[in-house]
Image: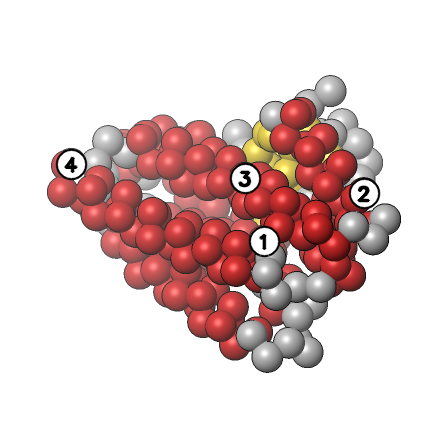
Amino acid sequence: MKTAVFLNIHADTYARFAHIRTQLLQASKESQANALGSVLSEMACEVVEQVFMVLLNENQQHSKTGESEKVIQQILEAIRKYMPWSISFFSNERLVPLVEYLSKTLLIEDDKIYMTYPVEQQLAQQVIASGQKLAEGDSREVANALKRLTEVIDVGVTHLIREPKKCLKFNFVVDKTLNGVINMTTHLGYKRLEKLATQLDQQVAVTYVDYFLKFMRHPADGG
């Protein structure tokens, strides 16, 4: 059975996206580029905050929390700067493939909106197994658990950023700039997770893995 990651999107953010999609599909003459750039940057920030912010929330007592916060703020700032800028180049017609790709990742379930992406069953099982070892008190499993979660996050970056980016067919210069931004921000986040693996105790790591496992489920599940 397939596993997917379900990330919450605020209802008002989704409503804005749905309105822009309607305008594009109805061939509205009014440019939607700025509005779309703004709403997609909000969606991306909502996803990043869910994936990484738990590190801050669960790690408040640790002196290294400030370092995590700085990294996450850098990622959010890069999204807010480059997402609207990159989309502002395009006519409505050129935005349709991107919007249609992203609309397929969105799911409404029990009055909640989720952005979803699939995860290979093998990786999902590895995360679950790692979480079980942690729960049983195996402190040696902390680094491996965070490594597996980083892999799950990177699958999301591919499905929700790298792949849809191709829909826009950027020119070489802009594409290179964006690839650089994506590589820089993911590297920052992943290195921080890697470093935290050496700082978190087993119990805090259990909390983080459990938190992340709540995002991962079978699409037909009720939760």
Callout 1: few (<14), some (14-19), or many (20+) C-alpha neighbours within 10 Å? some
Q: Are marks 3 and 4 in contact (CB under 8 Å)?
A: no
Name the residue beneath numbered marker 4.
171
Q: Name the side, left or right, on which 160 lies relative to 34.
A: right
Name the residue beneath numbered marker 3.
151
Marks 3 and 2, Cα distance to the nearest angstrom?
18 Å
Give the mark, 3 or 1, whose residue is nearer the N terminus. Answer: 1
Closest to the camera, between mark 3 and mark 4, is 3
Which numbered circle lies on residue 132?
2
SS label for mark 2: helix
Q: Amino acid at mark 1?
A: Val
Closest to the camera, between mark 4 and mark 1, is 1
**Residue occupying the point 44% across, 35% down:** 158
Measured from the top left, where is residue 133 in percent x and y?
79, 44
Marks 3 and 1, Cα distance to the nearest angstrom?
12 Å
Callout 3: few (<14), some (14-19), or many (20+) C-alpha neighbours within 10 Å? some
Measured from the top left, where is residue 81 in percent x and y?
31, 61
Closest to the camera, between mark 1 and mark 2, is 2
Q: Nearer the viewer, residue 66 or 217?
A: 66
Give the mark, 3 or 4, whose residue is nearer the N terminus. Answer: 3
Q: Amino acid at mark 3?
A: Glu
Q: Is residue 27 visible?
A: no
SS label for mark 1: helix
**Residue occupying the point 44% across, 66% down:** 71
Give the mark, 1 or 2, whose residue is nearer the N terminus. Answer: 1
Give the mark, 4 or 1, whose residue is nearer the N terminus. Answer: 1
Marks 3 and 4, Cα distance to the nearest angstrom?
29 Å
